[in-house]
Amino acid sequence: MPRNSADYDDDFFAWTQEQARLLRTGELTQIDIDNVVEELESMGRSVRRELRSRLALLIMHLLKWQHQPVFRSRSWSGTVREQRAQIKELIDESPSLGPVLAEGLTSIYASAVRKAVLETGLSEISFPANCPYTPEQILSEDFLPED
């Protein structure tokens, strides 16, 4: 018989530890299946959301680099390097996330433009309607756009 889902609602950490123990000991009939499934799916969505967020931040900084050359700084290039490193780590840990950039480039780019508008004060029409960078350029350690 599955564990009471009230445990899940009352003390999430204790619930996770109990579910892990049940799995390790093979007490599969005691597992809170519905909540375990929900948490696993949520974990996957969370990692994908983190990747998309990091990609949008990276693209925003590439846009800023290209459209505000007088404000270029080590901080901006450092953010570009750090986001690329974190993105690489996420994809190395979960290779199935590799296609996220190519598949979601349109919406990721739209998010990057919204962020760039807020940070730069430039109007949305200052930026290209479609992403001017290829997925390979976005992820390349050596790529910074020209003015």
Image (tube, rainbow, N blue to C red):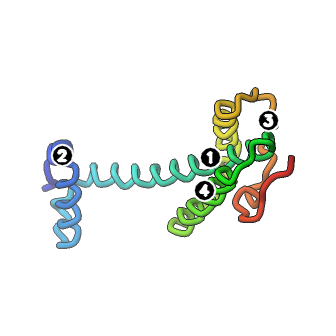
Label 4 near label 2: C-beta < 8 Å? no
- Disc 2 residue crowd, few under 14, some 14–19, many 20+, Cα 10 Å: few
Q: CA distance from mark 4 to mark 1?
A: 8 Å
Residue 5's disc number = 2
Mark 4 / mark 1, whichever is N-terminal: 1
Mark 3 / mark 4, whichever is N-terminal: 4
Q: CA distance from mark 1 to mark 3?
A: 15 Å
Q: Secondary structure at mark 4?
A: helix
In the picture of the structure, the residue carrying the numbered disc 1 is 57
Mark 2 / mark 4, whichever is N-terminal: 2
Q: Is residue 112 above or below residue 21?
A: above
Residue at 20%, 61% (x, y): give it.
17
- Disc 1 residue crowd, few under 14, some 14–19, many 20+, Cα 10 Å: many
x and y, in percent, of residue 146 in the image: 85, 51
Give the amino acid type for the residue marked by disc 3 in the picture: Phe
Residue 127's disc number = 3
Give the amino acid type for the residue marked by disc 4 in the picture: Gln
Residue at 75%, 42% (x, y): give it.
71
Depth check, front residue: 136 or 104: 136
